Image (tube, rainbow, N blue to C red):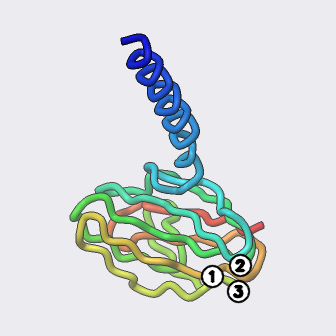
Amino acid sequence: MKKFFLVLTFLCIITLLIVACGGSSSSSSGSGSSSSTGSGHGGSATVHMGQTNFDQSSVAISKGSSLTLVDDTSTVHIISNGQWVNGVAQPKQEPGAPTVSNVQFSTSGQSQAIGPFNTAGTFHLYCSVHPDMNLTVNVQ
C-alpha cells in the first residue's frame, strides 16, 4: 500500500509539471481575440472584425510582415486601402502599402492575409460597408 501511494504521488507531481510547462505556450500565438504586434520579419499579426468595426483601431507590425483579418461574425465586410474621414469614405492607395481592393468577408471565421507590408510607415484600411470602420497599420 505504501508503494502505491508513492507511485501515485510521483505521477501527480509529473502531471503537474507537464501541465505547468505546457500551459503557458499560447500567450503569443495570436489565437486570442486580437494581436497588436507582429512577430517579426515575415511574421503575421491578427486583427478580428466584429459586426461594424475592427476589434482594435490600430496594429503595429514589423516590416516584411503580413496582417491577417478575421471576420468573427457573418456580417459582410469589404476591405480596401483608405479610410473613413468625417463620415466620408476616402479610398487611397498609399505608397508602399500592399494593394487591398474590395477584399470581401461574409462568413464567420473567414480570414484573409493582407501583405506583406515591405515598407515602413503608417497605412490605412477601411470597410466600405460600415462607416468609421478604420484600421491603422503601423509598420516598423
Q: Position of residue 45 (x, y in %)?
A: 57, 64
When the figure is inspected, residue 83 is found, relative to residue 7, above or below; the finding is below
Tag in front: 3 or 1: 1
On-image quarter of the C terminus? bottom right
Q: Three-letter amino acid code at disc 3?
A: Pro
Q: Nearer the viewer, residue 64 or 52?
A: 64
Residue at 38%, 62% (x, y): give it.
131
Residue at 45%, 24% (x, y): give it.
7
Q: What's the CA distance linking mark 3 and mark 2?
A: 15 Å
Q: In the rendered structure, find residue 116 and report the number of the disc placed on it.
A: 1
* Local SS, label 1: strand
Q: Three-letter amino acid code at disc 2?
A: Gly
| Earlier residue among tags 2 and 1 | 2
**Which image quarter: residue 137?**
bottom right
Q: Which residue position is annotated with label 2?
A: 64
Q: Position of residue 136 (x, y in %)?
A: 60, 63
Asked if labels 1 and 3 touch by Cβ distance under 8 angstroms, the answer is: no
Crowdedness of circle 3 by 10 Å Cα count: few (<14), some, many (20+)? few
When the figure is inspected, residue 91 is found, relative to residue 77, above or below; the finding is below
Tag in front: 3 or 2: 2
Q: Nearer the viewer, residue 27 or 133?
A: 27
73 lies left or right of 111 = left
Residue at 52%, 38% (x, y): give it.
18
| Earlier residue among tags 3 and 2 | 2
On-image quarter of the N terminus? top left
Q: Three-letter amino acid code at disc 1?
A: Pro
* Local SS, label 3: loop
Asked if labels 2 and 3 touch by Cβ distance under 8 angstroms, the answer is: no
When the figure is inspected, residue 20 is found, relative to residue 35, above or below; the finding is above
Asked if labels 1 and 2 touch by Cβ distance under 8 angstroms, the answer is: yes
Q: Which residue position is annotated with label 3?
A: 95
| Earlier residue among tags 3 and 1 | 3
